Image: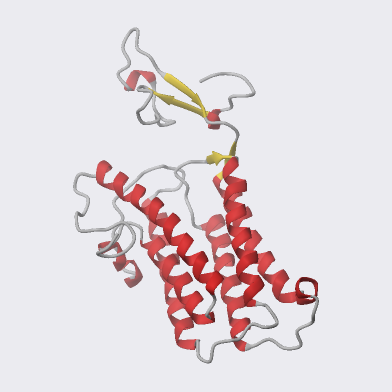
Amino acid sequence: MIAGSKYYVDRQSYKIDSKGKTLSDNEVLKGIGLGEGGKIFFKDLGPQIGWSSVFLAEYAGPLFIYLFFYVRPSIIYSVDISGRSLASQVACACWCFHYLKRLYETIYVHRFSHSTMPLFNLFKNCSYYWGFTAFVSYYNNHPLYTPPITFIHKNIIWKVCEYGNYSIHIAFKDLRPPGSTVRQIPKPTTNPMTRLFELVSCPNYTYEVGSWFFFSVMIQSLPAFLFCLVGLGQMSIWALAKHKNYKKEFPDYPTKRKAILPFIL
């Protein structure tokens, strides 16, 4: 470990091979087989920030931004809206519920394998979530927004996806004992929503995409659909990386599983 105020522990990375895997925080020199004259490579990861801090910031923003568009249309559109359609009310409720759930999960459910991430991610993630929220909410709450004739049945499917997403997060939490970085093969539990583990490695992303897709269809919003599409792209990248790591780490990992989309991807 390098002493000094600049290179605090969370921004230090060590490797035996310059192109190899970063050593775990629990590794000791005696246990990695580093002989006399051996080399160990150090990398400065740059300024770091806690995962939970980033999550809280990126999820709190969409909650307040959407509510601002909904509650203060006179500031955004220079016109007051006397009454809201049921679709607009449901859309606002769904949006707020999703991000309240996210905030709750960040505080009480998620167990992070790494304590920090690069500080730059705070600005990148917040720009993505906050920017898309402004884009979606501007059109969803516009005085000229035309609500769909029917949407209740799509809202029911949206709720199922939200519950499925939460169920998977709970399953992931139960796989990792408190205060540890233990990794196990995720498997279905007694909760029927976790059966999706039989088909994909990251069903939380599958449910997340389903949630935003049916939200988009429910309110017939092109900006919301674009948000869903971009989210699918990003979550596919994450899912493929995690799927690859699972197969590499566990020789007996189920071969029929896909990463995020059953039978496809």
Whole-percent x and y of residue 158?
A: 46, 77
Q: Is residue 77 left or right of residue 1?
A: right
Q: How is the image coloured?
A: secondary structure
Whole-percent x and y of residue 56?
A: 61, 54
In which quadrant of the rendered image does the C terminus lie? bottom left
* Numbered-mark total: 0
Whole-percent x and y of residue 89?
A: 63, 82
Q: Which residue sits furthest top?
A: 37
Q: Quadrant of residue 90?
A: bottom right
Write the residue at 59% across / 41% down: 120
Write the residue at 55% across / 66% down: 101
Write the residue at 61% across / 88% down: 86
Whole-percent x and y of residue 132?
A: 59, 62
Q: Quadrant of residue 28?
A: top left
Q: Is residue 230 left or right of residue 256?
A: right
Q: Is residue 201 above or below residue 7?
A: below
Tell which of 77 and 40 is nearer to you: 77
Q: Which residue sits furthest bottom?
A: 149
Tell which of 48 and 3 is nearer to you: 48
Q: Quadrant of residue 234?
A: bottom left
